[in-house]
């Protein structure tokens, strides 16, 4: 199921960019399937951006003190669900994390680390370029949806 979801998540974007499905199979070699329990803090403000992931199952809440309304810590400024890419922009830029990410349910995810990304960039530049293009396309779509909602947040 996890492998099928990885490939399904890429299919629509690959089709739009006119890239073959083999691209997803090549990319998968640089990712690792992982799980996290409800309540796990995936990162906090100032943490190094050393991984990003594709959420397969579960739910994540984003806490951002700058954007939070009122004093309630449980108030999330954004949520992420199945099919969302999370943390990819900071992984590419190397900027530290700007918010807190909390698993509000048990999670399963395909994770890429900074080390894997560096390896991809050194040994499979065509895949690294495809991954960056795909991630930027998803990020642009996420920002567009945020704009429609009247706010812009970056994970």
Image (cartoon, rainbow, N blue to C red):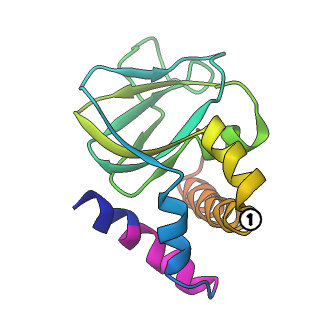
Q: Nearer the viewer, residue 137 or 73?
A: 137
Q: Nearer the viewer, residue 61 or 26?
A: 26
Which quarter of the rendering shows the N terminus? bottom left
Q: Nearer the viewer, residue 128 or 49?
A: 128
Which quarter of the rendering shows the C terminus? top right
Disc 1 designates what residue? Answer: 129
**In x, y percent, where is residue 62?**
46, 31
**In x, y percent, where is residue 69?**
50, 23
**In x, y percent, where is residue 23?**
56, 74
Residue 153 visible to the viewer: no
Type of secondary structure dominating the magenta stretch: helix
Residue 147 visible to the viewer: yes
Q: Residue at x 33, y 54 (%)?
A: 82
Secondary structure beneath disc 1?
Answer: helix
Residue 99 belongs to magenta span: no
Total labels: the figure holds 1
Residue 138 placement: quadrant: bottom right
Residue 87 placement: quadrant: top right
Q: Residue at x 70, y 62 (%)?
A: 124
Tell me if mark 1 has few (under 14), some (14-19) or many (20+) residues whose alpha carbon lies within 10 angstroms of its own.
Answer: few
Residue 105 placement: quadrant: top left
**In x, y percent, where is residue 19?**
61, 83
Magenta region, residue range: 7-17
Q: Nearer the viewer, residue 134 or 65?
A: 134
Residue 11 belongs to magenta span: yes
Q: Is residue 135 left or right of residue 68?
A: right
């Amino acid at each position: 199921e996890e492998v099928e979801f990885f490939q399904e998540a890429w299919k629509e974007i690959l089709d739009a960019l006119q890239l073959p499905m083999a691209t997803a199979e090549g990319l998968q070699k640089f990712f690792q399937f992982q799980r996290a329990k409800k309540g796990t803090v995936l990162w906090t403000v100032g943490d190094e951006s050393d991984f990003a992931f594709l959420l397969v199952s579960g739910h994540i809440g984003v806490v951002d003190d700058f954007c939070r309304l009122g004093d309630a810590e449980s108030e999330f400024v954004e949520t992420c669900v199945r099919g969302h890419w999370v943390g990819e922009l900071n992984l590419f830029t190397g900027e530290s994390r700007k918010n807190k990410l909390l698993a509000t349910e048990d999670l399963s995810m395909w994770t890429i680390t900074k080390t894997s990304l560096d390896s991809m960039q050194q040994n499979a530049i065509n895949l690294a370029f495809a991954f960056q293009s795909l991630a930027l396309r998803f990020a642009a779509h996420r920002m567009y949806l945020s704009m429609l909602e009247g706010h812009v947040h970056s994970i």
